[in-house]
Amino acid sequence: CTKMSSNCVHHHDVTVIGAGWSGLLACKYALEEGLSVATLERRENIGGVWFYSDDPGLSTVMKSTECTSSSTVTEMSDFPMPESMGLFPHHRDVIRYLHSYASKFGLHRHIKLSVEVQEVQKVDEQWRVRCTNGDEYVSKFLVVATGVMQKANRELEDTVLKGFAGRIHHAQEIKEPLEELRDKRLLVVGGGETGSDLCMEWYNHARFIYWSIPRGQHFFRKRAKLLPWGRPQALDKASSRAMKLIAPFYHSKPGLSWVCKYTTQGSLLAYQGHGIPEWKNDARFFRFFINKNGKVLDLVDYNHLVPKGGILSCSGNTVNFADGTTQEFDLIIMSTGYKTEYPFLPSRYANVRIRQRHKFVFDVEDPTIAFIGLVRPVVGSIVGISELQARWVAKVFSKHAPLKSLAERKKDVTADTAQWSEYFKNSSQRIEGLVEGFTYVDDIAKHAGIYPNYWNLFRRNPYHWFVATFSPYNAASLRLNEERHRAQAIATMQSHRKATLNPVHLMLIMFMRLIWFDWWLNQLSNIKYRIQVSSWWRNIQNWKIVRALCHLANLPKQSLYHPETHFKLPPR
């Protein structure tokens, strides 16, 4: 560095802000493309939100958090997760994995820990990043990888929760059940996997729990048996290239969605994965964020959790729900997500909405700045998308991949905004970076020039083509065009193909699509919903005979779910 009073000015090609999962990937791929990099992290360790802290003011995972996406769709393309981590690694294992990754590719020496960015300016075509310690980092390119969990969204405190007299916390502040809040009457507000985690953590800690999800929710169970005599498997592994051809995810998985419902709730009529009228909305399957912590539905079955829709108002400790009911609570925990803010960036860049960036990554007018890790798939891994974005950004910065002209980028933004707005038109649109993950991945892979050439692979080695076509989605598939990575990529994909759907299963799914099986089930599910919301059903649903029949209807779940994911609790 060069001295400027007592501080240093560092010069390099790329500055990366944030050393969480996305920041590490941005650093790694910039180095791989021959660029010099400095990665700045304000905390004392890498990992971002996965680096757990008890500090309620820091946005991190909860104490018990594990991945909701399997290792198959989460691991890096050239660094498989060890089998000892399991299908859904705990956050401690994730941090160890990230350190191993950083060590293998020599990233640690390019990372500056405990360095907080204060201000970023662009001067004479150079990004100047000034830090609170006085140091300055100067580069031609800038990557922002500060994640989506930045500022807790507490807007409800000023609206429907304004009159509540009890305690209100945001999920950011709750890392584990607090002893001083034991046996309190708890209301969780807001959907998502954090809401599921809260209900799972607190159901035997609180006196009772209600869960209000104002705009409904779709559910998916992480792991279950496809058949009672089969082995439990990660359900997001039903994602092979062949599967996506037979039952396109972008078109709501025709021929396959019935499997998702059955393996999530043990019923073919479990609309939106839950079959709970309070949480139903108008969105089609796969056109709304899917909560992959479907295990929480067991709490509803065993009367340990009361599902609710929206809230109208609060008065004292009383909450008035949109269905006309009321209930008193001592405590409300908001699972209302986060706001993405960049106080260090000039407003010209900070105030651009994610959909107004080229492919949600590059600033349209100034592609020397890129944002990685803000896109969230309906099902799949944020990390898998981040890796692909990082590869594309590094190739563009190093001029190893072309970037479209300004006019073409503007045209893409208009088209993409219209596409995803229409696709998610019946969702809350709160998650602006929400996409159908596999469609988005294919698009970015083509822009980066790394989309697999399956025809060439077939000509080279038909068996490799078979493995690549019938294996679950794994980032290694995007290494198939690279001679030095192909053998490892095939070996990785083959290891994940074991105990997943085979070609015979795919033929069954194709048959189900041809006979419109999902369409018929949707008609029956609509009838079920109308019965559930009818007045006569409300009058008889608590009869002993009706409750007994409902309990019998839940029995298939016990043969489908792994013991670790199934509750064996007596009804309250």
Image (cartoon, rainbow, N blue to C red):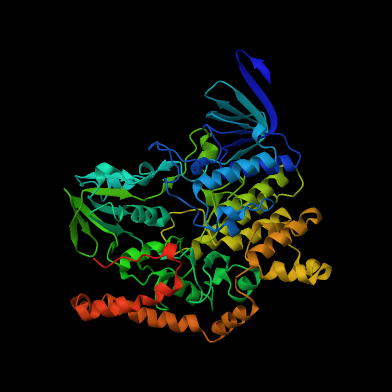
Residue 304 location in percent, x, y? 28, 62
Q: Quadrant of the C terminus?
A: bottom left
Q: Residue at x 53, y 87 (%)?
A: 515
Between 131 and 469, the residue placed more toward the observer is: 469
Between 448 and 184, the residue placed more toward the observer is: 184
Residue 45 in the image: above or below residue 327? above
Residue 230 location in percent, x, y? 53, 74
Could one spot residue 530 in this view of the protein?
yes
Q: Residue furthest right?
A: 460
Residue 146 location in percent, x, y? 53, 40
Total tally of numbered discs in the picture? 0
442 lies left or right of 147: right
Quadrant assignment, res 199: bottom left
Could one spot residue 426 in this view of the protein?
no
534 lies left or right of 447: left
Q: Quadrant of the N terminus?
A: top right
Residue 295 location in percent, x, y? 41, 63
Residue 567 in the image: above or below residue 230? above
Q: Residue furthest top?
A: 5
Between 113 and 387, the residue placed more toward the observer is: 113
Q: Residue at x 65, y 47 (%)?
A: 390
